[in-house]
Amino acid sequence: MAVEREMERIEIAQQLGPRYGPPVPITDQLRDFGLGLMMFLTSKPAIDFYSVVAGELRRHEELARAFYDFGPGRTRANLTNLIVGAAAGGELSVSNPEHAADELFGLWQGFTNFQMSLGIDIDEIRRDLPNRIERGVKLFVMAYAKPR
């Protein structure tokens, strides 16, 4: 099924595989996750896929919910789990990890979804992704830093 293949690709982009060696700081984990995710979401195949699927799914509420739960919902859960782990490890102070995940994704995405759906400045968006991700991670960590 096309949706399953697409969701496998997005999970690979999130770079959540097992890590060996010393613990990786949350800033590095979030940077890797964000860059992989946003590079995927700004790719031509992903833009084309979502453009075609979104229109069809709006007509079928139960399919739309299943698609969301299987794809974007899992991405949200993966990001939330990273944040929960960092909070449990003392790197962050987060009272609502799901809200925090939404906020971080918003910092990464900004208005790019509108630009991409309209085909505006996509190459520029992709070139700036490392900077956008870095700014988002820095702001996020400042907002959720463990109090000293």
Image (cartoon, grey):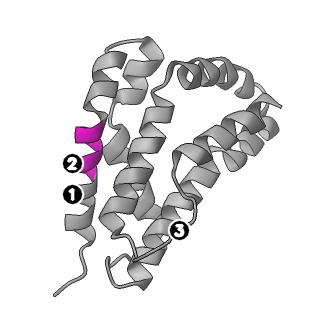
Q: Are marks 1 and 2 in contact (CB under 8 Å)?
A: yes
SS for callout 3: helix
The residue beneath circle 2 is 135
Q: Earlier in the sequence, mark 3 or mark 1?
A: 3
The N terminus appears in which quarter of the rendering?
A: top right
* Secondary structure that dominates the magenta span: helix
* Magenta span includes 107: no
Residue 115 image position (x, y, % from top left) = 37, 20
**Range shown magenta:** 130-136
The residue beneath circle 3 is 81
Question: Which quadrant would residue 99 be assigned to in this image?
Answer: bottom left
Residue 83 image position (x, y, % from top left) = 43, 69
Number of residue marks = 3
- Identify the residue shown where x is 25% and y is 30%: 128
Front residue of 47/33: it is 33
SS for callout 1: helix
* Outermost residue to the bottom: 148
Calculate the distance from the C-alpha at mark 2 to the C-alpha at mark 3.
21 Å
The residue beneath circle 1 is 138
Calculate the distance from the C-alpha at mark 3 to the C-alpha at mark 1.
19 Å
Please tell me how crowded label 1 is: few (under 14), some (14-19), or many (20+) other residues with Cα within 10 Å: few
48 to 35, vertically: above or below = above
| Amino acid marked by disc 1 | Lys
Q: Are marks 3 and 1 in contact (CB under 8 Å)?
A: no
* Outermost residue to the top: 119
- Identify the residue shown where x is 57% and y is 59%: 17
28 to 92, vertically: above or below = above
Q: What's the mark number on residue 107?
A: none
Residue 82 image position (x, y, % from top left) = 47, 67
| Amino acid marked by disc 2 | Arg
